[in-house]
Amino acid sequence: MSCLARVRLLVPPSHHAELTVVCRLVYCGRYMASEHLLRKTQADNLLERTALQLQQMLQEACAKLDPFPSFPNALFTHAIECEADSAAASDRGCIVVAEDGNLYELEMGIDHDSIELTGSWDPVTARKETLKPVDLHPRDYITYAYNGLIVVTEHLLEQEAEKGEGHG
């Protein structure tokens, strides 16, 4: 209202009603913008909380998975692939969940330094498998972590069934 009072001093009395409507629209527009930003902030916070909860659940599930499976065709890496679904990005490689319950990008290749050091080509010593930590937006993390949790849960159920068959 102080804005209206200051403006009214500069406007002839015949234009007060028109000016009041314009000022209220501007104020209402600012309020609505703040309300929209608040809603977006609340949604961002919800995504972050959900991502943190999924991370904790995934870590707990991975801690129970014993033995943790090896990644297919990997010689040294124990990890499970997490499907990308809607979080797929061309700059991301294979995202996996490792034994610690965290998400990584698995990079597989040839270790040229070991070949030079040994002077021979040995497929085991020349193999390079690296788990690179990934920094994902909570929206993408939720997709990968949820899919990882599903696969880890499937492995846990299989292990439980195998233990049950061994006792029966």
Image: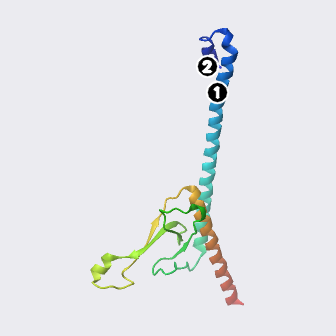
- Which quarter of the rendered picture does the N terminus lie within? top right
Distance, label 2 to label 1, CA atoms, is: 10 Å
- How many residues crowd around disc 1 within 10 Å: few (fewer than 14), some, or many (20 or more)? some
Query: Image height check: is 117 above or below 150?
Result: below
The x, y position of residue 71, in whole percent, is 52, 78
The label shown at residue 27 is 1
Where's residue 72, x and y in %? 52, 80
Q: Residues within 10 Å of mark 2 (few under 14, many from 20)?
A: few
Q: What x and y, as percent, mark residue 98? A: 52, 71
Amino acid type for the residue under numbered disc 2: Cys
- Which quadrant of the view contains residue 162? bottom right
Image x and y of residue 122, in percent: 35, 85
Residue drawn where x is 40% and y is 75% of the image: 109
For the C terminus, the quadrant is bottom right
- Check whether the beta carbons of the residues at disc 2 and disc 1 lie within 8 A of each other: yes
Residue 27 vs 161, above or below: the answer is above
Give the structural element (helix, strand or loop) at label 2.
helix
Q: Is residue 95 above or below residue 10?
A: below
Q: Amino acid at mark 1?
A: Tyr
In the displayed structure, does residue 69 sit left or right of residue 25?
A: left
Q: Position of 38 compared to 127: left or right?
A: right
Which mark, residue 3?
A: 2
Q: How is the image coloured?
A: rainbow
In this view, 155 is above or below 10 = below
Name the residue at 59% across, 69% down.
Answer: 148
* Secondary structure found at label 1: helix
Give the quarter of the image for residue 60.
bottom right
Q: What is the total number of numbered labels drawn onto the structure image? A: 2
Residue 40 quadrant: top right
